[in-house]
Image: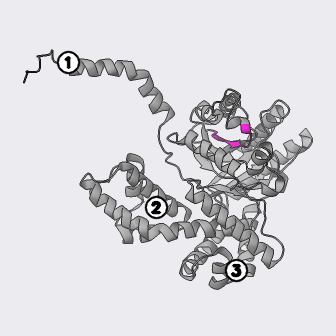
Amino acid sequence: MTNRPHTRPVELDMLAADLDELLAVSDAQLATDYPGESYGRQPVHTAYVAAHRFAPDTVRLWGSQAIAAMDEFAKDTTEFATAFGLRPEVAEQVRPLVLAKLDAEPIEDIRIDFEDGYGTRSDETEDSHARAAARSLLFVLGEDGAPPIVGIRCKSLESKTRRRAIKTIDAFLDALCENGGKPPPGLLITLPKVTSADQVSAMNLLCQRFESAYGLVYPRRLPFEIQVEMPQLIVGADGAATIARCVHAGRHRLVGLHFGTYDYSAAVGVSADHQSLEHPSADYAKSVMQVAVAGTGVALSDGSSNVLPVGSKEQVIAAWQLHAGLVRRSLERGFYQGWDLHPAQLVSRYAASYAFYRQGFGGACDRLRSYAERSAAGLEEPATGRALAGYLSRALNCGAVTEVELKAQTGWDQDKLRHLRFRGTVPSPW
């Protein structure tokens, strides 16, 4: 047996310093481009209302019309369970929660639409509608049950509509700032028909210029979200995933990606009868979106269903069942938000969302208790804890469960969940 020849010992500190220098740029890029999950509340939906139809009573009317639909077509626990395919004991828990939500906060996020739902009108007319919508929004925000998140969808930054988009945003902001007023914090602008990362950079510049012009500072800065409804955004001419470049071109002002079901499906050649959130082409696009935003803090939203709950009882129930199934499917795939186009869709949105969280609540609480114990012994991965905390936080935020229920089941409160969700460690003492 020969002895290992003596070698000169490695200077570990020097080696570490060399690696620090070599990796300094990539370390900085990782920290900047992938800061982690956002700390803000994500709404379960976005309600789109055409700008010329938006009025001071719009939110209140959506809530009352949704309650009226429940009273007519799901008037008791049995009918509610049948309409949404729920077990009686789940329906008994969920139905009163939905009614309470529709009464107290029927819309979590509203977007006043100046694009497809609004159409093309004269400059004078759109300016007038933009100002009227802004004044109506100020009234809405002064009422009980106002949406916690609000914004507008302008026209695209393609050359034909670019100036109109700029003018609409300006008219809307100008009306909000009348008489010394200010836009609500976090006012969102949705940019549709995006085809390149350059348009995202341009939107970033546009928001900066308007902030400067109207004296807007944090928390009244102008964030924006983009709609993924053009195939070029998924795979560009160079074969790259353009959407990933868009996410980073937003420079942390970009806060969300919203999938556009029908524009995207039509653009890739899907026939009208088969356009759906669950079409394979839609699933592919959304999978690319999901990977592009992972670790960036940019939120995802699924699209809409245009099968509206109107007409006979059979037609309403069928539309509810379709919509609730699509909502559940999105939630299971990690899309926690979607679009709603009609007041009665609020019923199926909340019914499906609340059932999703309540059906998994007991198991998640059991796992959280076990996780805390096993984590102390080094037997659990931080990613598991973050996922559990994220699920329970979303359940609390949307009203599916209460903090009293959480504490009774786990001994945890919202602050401890937040600690685990964003730091990946169990707070001490837990």
Label 3 is placed on what type of residue?
Answer: Ala
Per the rendering, the mark at residue 74 is 3
Which residue lies under the disc numbered 2? 392
Relative to 403, is 110 on the left or the right?
A: right
Q: Which of marks 3 and 2 is nearer the N terminus?
A: 3
Quadrant in which the N terminus is drawn: top left
Q: How many other residues sit within 10 Å of disc 2, few (<14), some (14-19) or many (≥20)? A: many
The residue closer to the viewer here, 332 or 93, is: 332
Q: How are the colours assigned in the image?
A: one colour
Label 1 is placed on what type of residue?
Answer: Glu
Q: Is 130 inside the magenta-drawn segment? A: no
Q: Earlier in the sequence, mark 3 or mark 1?
A: 1
Residue at image position (23%, 54%) is 377
Q: How many other residues sit within 10 Å of disc 1, few (<14), some (14-19) or many (≥20)? A: few
Q: Quadrant of residue 345?
A: bottom right
Check the image and report above or below for 240 versus 101: above
Q: Earlier in the sequence, mark 1 or mark 2?
A: 1
Question: Magenta stretch?
Answer: 222-231
Residue at image position (26%, 19%) is 15
Q: Quadrant of residue 226?
A: top right
| Cα gap from disc 3 to disc 1, whole angstroms | 74 Å
